[in-house]
């Protein structure tokens, strides 16, 4: 077993009060944890801001966290257009309605957030970027990110686009999301 214990984590946060402003909860998918609300409540009780990175697949947990004021910022992955979402996520079937519900909650609320799509040559096309644009039309913060091979991939041989190709895809996205930007190039 590796990692830090629950107790050690909170001991660290208590010692760092005043030196740190916030905690970013990332994963895997943090919302898979059934006790995530209690965990974040404890962090907030120490006075820290909380940013959550999520894929949006657990809207009920996300909505509960937002509605109870436990989050200060959310970064939500939009893996691809709904048509290609499952393949991009490495699944046979994906419950895209859950992802759409999470996105809608962010889009219609007041909590600061961003959407981000990691560009992978195997999965993203002009048409899929156009479809993402239609889905997220008018949103303020949307990023196309550079793919980085972490060595732990859903299939071998995956690679990103060049910066020039990514800028071309960004131009397509900006038809629908004018403030979209590149990240990681």
Image: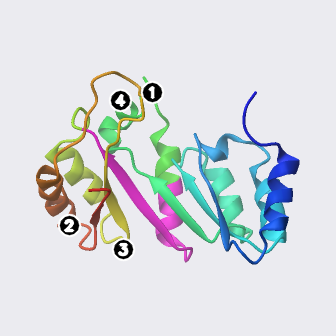
Q: Earlier in the sequence, mark 2 or mark 4?
A: 4
Q: Quadrant of residue 32?
A: top right
Q: In x, y percent, where is residue 10?
A: 84, 57
Q: CA distance from mark 4 to mark 3?
A: 27 Å
Left or right: 153 in relation to 22 = left
Whole-number angstrom distance, CA of label 2 to CA of label 1:
29 Å
Q: Which residue is mark 2?
A: 174
- State yes or no: residue 84 in magenta: no
Task: Identify the residue under disc 4.
Answer: 87
SS category of the residue bearing label 3: loop
Q: Which residues are magenta?
A: 102-120
Is label 1 in a helix, a strand or a loop?
A: loop
Residue at image location 71% in from the left, 72% down from the top:
69
Residues 31 and 136: in front is 31
Q: Quadrant of residue 173?
A: bottom left
Nearest the viewer among 42 and 2 is 2
Residue 156 appears at what percent x and percent y? 33, 21
Alpha carbon distance from label 1 to label 3: 30 Å
Task: Indicate whether 117 appears above or below 104.
Answer: above
Q: Count residues near mark 4 (Cα–Cα under 10 Å), then give few for <14, some for 14-19, many for 20+.
A: some
Q: Nearer the viewer, mark 1 or mark 3?
A: 3
For the residues marked 2 and 4, what is the alpha-carbon distance in whole angstroms?
A: 24 Å
Q: Which residue is mark 3?
A: 140
* Residue named by callout 1: 93
User: Does dot 4 land on a helix, a strand or a loop?
Assistant: helix
Q: Residue at x 44, y 26 (%)?
A: 91
Classed neighbour count for the residue bearing mark 3: other residues with Cα under 10 Å, few (<14), some (14–19), many (≥20): some
Q: Nearer the viewer, mark 2 or mark 1?
A: 2
Q: Earlier in the sequence, mark 2 or mark 3?
A: 3
Circle nearer the N terminus (2, 1): 1
Residue 143: x, y in percent? 33, 61
- Residue 85: horizontal and vertical position, in percent? 37, 38
């Amino acid at each position: 077993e590796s990692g830090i214990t629950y107790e050690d984590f909170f001991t660290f946060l208590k010692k760092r009060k005043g030196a740190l402003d916030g905690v970013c909860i990332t994963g895997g998918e943090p919302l898979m944890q059934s006790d995530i609300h209690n965990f974040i409540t404890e962090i907030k009780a120490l006075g820290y801001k909380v940013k959550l990175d999520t894929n949006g697949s657990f809207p009920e947990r996300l909505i509960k966290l937002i509605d109870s004021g436990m989050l200060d910022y959310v970064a939500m992955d939009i893996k691809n257009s709904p048509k290609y979402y499952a393949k991009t996520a490495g699944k046979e079937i994906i419950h895209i309605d859950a992802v759409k519900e999470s996105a809608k909650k962010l889009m219609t609320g007041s909590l600061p957030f961003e959407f981000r799509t990691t560009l992978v040559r195997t999965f993203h096309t002009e048409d899929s970027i156009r479809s993402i644009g239609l889905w997220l039309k008018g949103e303020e913060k949307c990023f196309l990110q550079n793919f980085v091979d972490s060595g732990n991939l859903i299939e071998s041989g995956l690679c990103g686009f060049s910066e020039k190709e990514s800028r071309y895809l960004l131009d397509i996205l900006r038809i629908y999301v004018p403030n979209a930007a590149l990240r990681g190039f």
